[in-house]
Amino acid sequence: MGYQGPTRQPLRRVQIGPFRTHIDDNIERLDARLESLFGPDWDHLEPVARQPAPTDDNVWARMIGERILAVAAYLQRCARIPAMTSGQLLEANVLRTPPSPEWAFAAEVPVVDGVAPRISNGAYAQAIRTLAWCSSGADHPGAGAFQDELEHIFVKPAGRALQETGKSGIFVAMGAFLADVPFAHIGSGRYLLGWGSRAVLTHRSSVGTDSAIGCKIATRKSVSADLLRIAGLPVPENHLVGSEEQAVKVSKRLAWPVVVKPNDRERGEGVTIGIRSEAGLLEAFAQAKHLSPSVLVEKHVEGVCHRVLVVRGRVLLVVKRNPQQVEGDGSRSIEALIDAKNLENQRKPPWARAAALPAASEITEWLAARGLEPGHIPEQEEVVPLRLFESALWGGQPEVVTERIHPENADICLRAAALLGIDVAGIDLITTDISVPWQENGAVINEVNHAPFFAVKPQRKHLLREFVEAILPDGGRIPVHLVIGGESAFERGRELQAARCADGERCFLTVGNATLRPDGSVMPSTMDGLYRRTSSLLLDRTVDSIVMVAEDDSLLETGMPVDRLQSVDETCTDGNDWAHRLAVWARRFTQGGQA
């Protein structure tokens, strides 16, 4: 891994190049094309410095190297690989020789467990291609083809290699990065946030403290509705049915309109709302029955679904789940507004695109039922819905309304999450107005979801930090101490361990070939070396603190297993050159160390 300074992710040293390609020396123009290709917020985690034009080749080379690292990290995140930092550029060289300049870079770049180096190496190759494309004078219409190439060549294959199982995991890791919480990727969208006894396991947006029973109940809509009803919480009247005859009988008893949905599916799959006829009911029943052996028929409740994100007894976010829609400007027709919005969406990279709006010709009946036609010109800011509701298939237009939720509505959402024992829950509240108490407008809790989809735009990335801070209020870190020296360093480490244990901590001590429990007994391990043994202790939920004893300078080769040290003890260095070098480097990982 080589020499590294303190970062929130472990780094490895790489050599990028030498390679030959033309890259624009007009940095302002290059940055403008990157923004046009990826959007204005592509580097929002670590913005590249928008410096003036380079004064010489060395400055130019460094500016290009920084952008290669930043684009590579961005592409990995698009593939849901948690490369949250661009890393550190160590050397940058350019040689202007025909037919094109020769480039060479040395850098330390993020290491993500479970991701083969060839994947991240591929990101740097695609970053070079991207800068070359931005330097080619290509105009905007060519961007779509290049974006599709990046998707096909890197983003999709890299995502498959990671075996990510959900879209929320990368955002949780991003929240940890923003909250300065250490995290480790342990495969398929699962992360360990924090260290030792202060850590929490996450999968997508669910956390290890969620009730397994509660999560199982949440997957069965009829069971969770019954539980909420018994607890005095508002839910729609519903009944499980197993046949068309039962569905018709229940619908007549409930009175039209009704809703039909599979009993155990998520993301709006197979849901039909606003059913007002027997023919529509039978069609909806067949669709739901195809997805699930049990079908739920429930009374339709007027209103819009609002997703209320509850995190450990706190409402963190409320989103009004508007259906796909267009907003009038007083001059363009519905058809023109749809075409313009689809064109704007198509210009985004494939991984950032929303579901396309339906062509006006596909929804003429929908519009006609509302007294509209494709050529109608909506007034300024007039909203024209294009679907009945938001769904995973159609997408929608979410609207953040957190500040508008009435305390009584927030209360029933908190009570529902607590009833099921789910620390991170997405409560779907159907209401005509989120600012009005549920008991006044007939609002109902439609569903309680565990592992709710959680993603926010860069402008609201503070919510990612707040999410992690809510599930890890103590910051997730445990104290890690380093003792450096020869034979006497081990005894010094034992003294520190005993002092920590006397303070009530479960402190473990480790050297390169042994690990001691708080009681002094040897804890067997399959790991060898100080780096690996310490890393394994960080994953142990019984560990309150760690004393590392470095009896040689191997850490200079492996890197530091943590991004922060509580202390560096040099009392046993005895003037050894290797110990002095290690101590100087290690001090960079302390809170007050010098970088």
Image: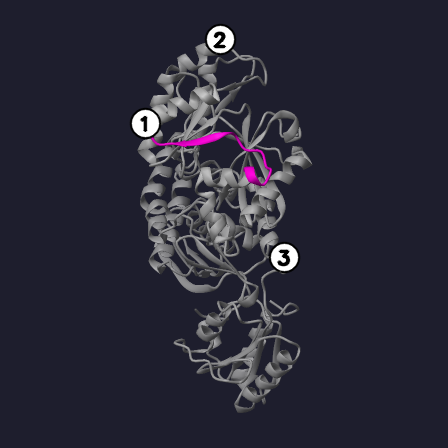
Q: What's the mark number on residue 593?
A: none
Distance, label 2 to label 1, CA atoms, is: 30 Å
Residue 286's tag is 1
Residue 335 in percent (x, y) is at: 44, 15
393 to 94, vertically: above or below: above
Q: Element at badge 3?
A: loop
Instruction: Establish if 540 lies above or below 243.
Output: below
Q: Main secondary structure of the magenta part?
A: loop
Q: Residue at position x 62%, y 26% from top?
A: 433
Residues in magenta, as a range: 229-243
Q: Quarter of the image holding residue 249? A: top left
Q: Are marks 2 and 1 in contact (CB under 8 Å)?
A: no
**For marks 1 and 3 on the same chain, the one whose residue lies earlier in the sequence:** 1
Query: Is 351 left or right of 412, judged from the image as shown?
Result: left
Quick check: is 31 in the magenta stretch? no
**472 vs 195: above or below:** above
Viewer-side label of 2, 1: 1
Q: Which mark is residue 371?
A: 2
Instruction: List the residue tagged with mark 3.
Output: 473
Q: Amino acid at mark 3?
A: Pro
Residue that lies at the very extreme toward the right in this rendered image: 407
Let me know if residue 576 appears in the view: no
Label 2 sits on a secondary structure element that is: loop
Tell me which corner region of the image, top left, top right, bottom left or bottom right, holds residue 220: top left
Q: Earlier in the sequence, mark 3 or mark 2?
A: 2
Q: Horizontally, is 107 left or right of 182 in the view?
A: left
Residue depicted at 43% across the width and 36% down the height: 267
The quadrant of the image that shows the C terminus is bottom right
- Residue 591 coordinates in the image, percent (x, y): 64, 67
Label 1: few (<14), some (14–19) or many (≥20) C-alpha neighbours in 10 Å: some
- Going by the numbered disc 1, the residue's amino acid type is Ala
**Neighbourhood count class around disc 2 (C-alpha, 10 Å): few under 14, some 14–19, many 20 upward:** few
